[in-house]
Image (spheres, rainbow, N blue to C red):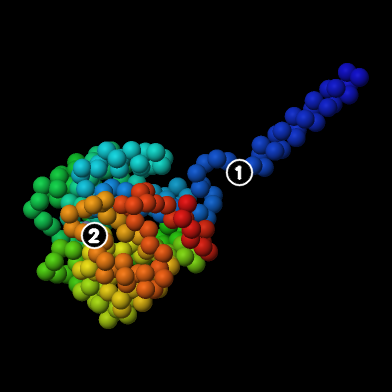
Amino acid sequence: MKIIKRLFHIMLCILIMLQTSCYPSNKKNSNSQILNVYFINVGQGDSILIQYKDINMLIDAGPSYNSKKLVSFLKAHNVKKLDYVIATHPHEDHIGSMDSIIKKFKILKFYAPKVVTDTTTFKSMITELKKKNLKINVAKHGVIINFDNFTSLEFLSPIKDNYQNLNNYSTVVLLKHRDTSFLFTGDAEKLIEMELLSNNVNVRADVIKVSHHGSNTSTSGDFIDKVKAKFAVISCGLGNDFGHPHEQVLKTLRSRDIICYRTDTHGNLLLQSDGKNISRR
Ligand SMILES: [Zn+2]
């Protein structure tokens, strides 16, 4: 009887060991093909976190008044280092919290378009970059970041060296993950949309981060027809002073049956790609 009990005990132990080793570890996405794109509710501004395997990328850091909120969000999402940071263009609603981000996180590569401004926000971003010995990689048409063989981010703009409006320096980037894609447009205006189309740049994407918080300076029908997105995300502050998003833009998206999400009404948004499909989580 004693032997049978012991044998039963050994069998049970083996079973438990087998089960434990068969289950995937809880480590976030480390071996999966899941790509997460978070549109963080930073109020009137943009900040997007992309997580794939153990890679973290941040596109813009939103306005300074929400810096604590942004830092907490990143920490809550297990961000210990940022492999890539992109500052689309040097306006406060995109780089306002960049100094805090540079201070608080280890950054491996920093990208921004080649343009300078004399604002305090821009200067404090540069000061923090210098303190960390981080150089700025120029964000411009043709630059590509490969996450692996199946996932990459391509800089589609700026194409030219000079623009009159700072918004138009916004680097437009296309993230491809297997069969799915996301287009991030910063605050690029219709001039840039036309420039991309006239240069035959492929802008087709499943998700478009609507440019300039849904302002009617951007999102022309011709551009949207080329992107052919299924989902659109508008990043803007609730009851903002600019009336963003503008009705014309909402109409353009609605008339094409594009599913529209907004950070002002939906809060933080997660769109997840498994490589074949994109869904909201
Ligand atoms: Zn903006």
Q: Image quarter for residue 195?
A: bottom left
Which residue is labeled 1 in the image? 24
Q: Image quarter for residue 196?
A: bottom left
Residue 244, disc: 2
- Amino acid type, callout 2: His
Q: Is residue 6 above or below residue 17?
A: above
Quadrant for ligand 1 reads bottom left
Residue located at (20% from left, 68% from top) = 217
Q: How far apart are marks 2 and 1 (CA)?
A: 44 Å
The answer to which of 230 and 24 lies nearer the viewer is 230
- State the image coordinates of residue 280 (x, y, percent, origin top left): 46, 55
Estimate how packed mark 1 is, as few (under 14), some (14 to 19) or many (20 or more) residues with alpha carbons within 10 Å.
few
- Amino acid type, callout 1: Pro
Residue furthest left in the image: 118
- The answer to whether 53 appears left or right of 56 in the picture is right
Tag 1 secondary structure: loop
- State the image coordinates of residue 134 (x, y, percent, origin top left): 24, 48
Q: In this view, does 80 lie above or below 167?
A: above
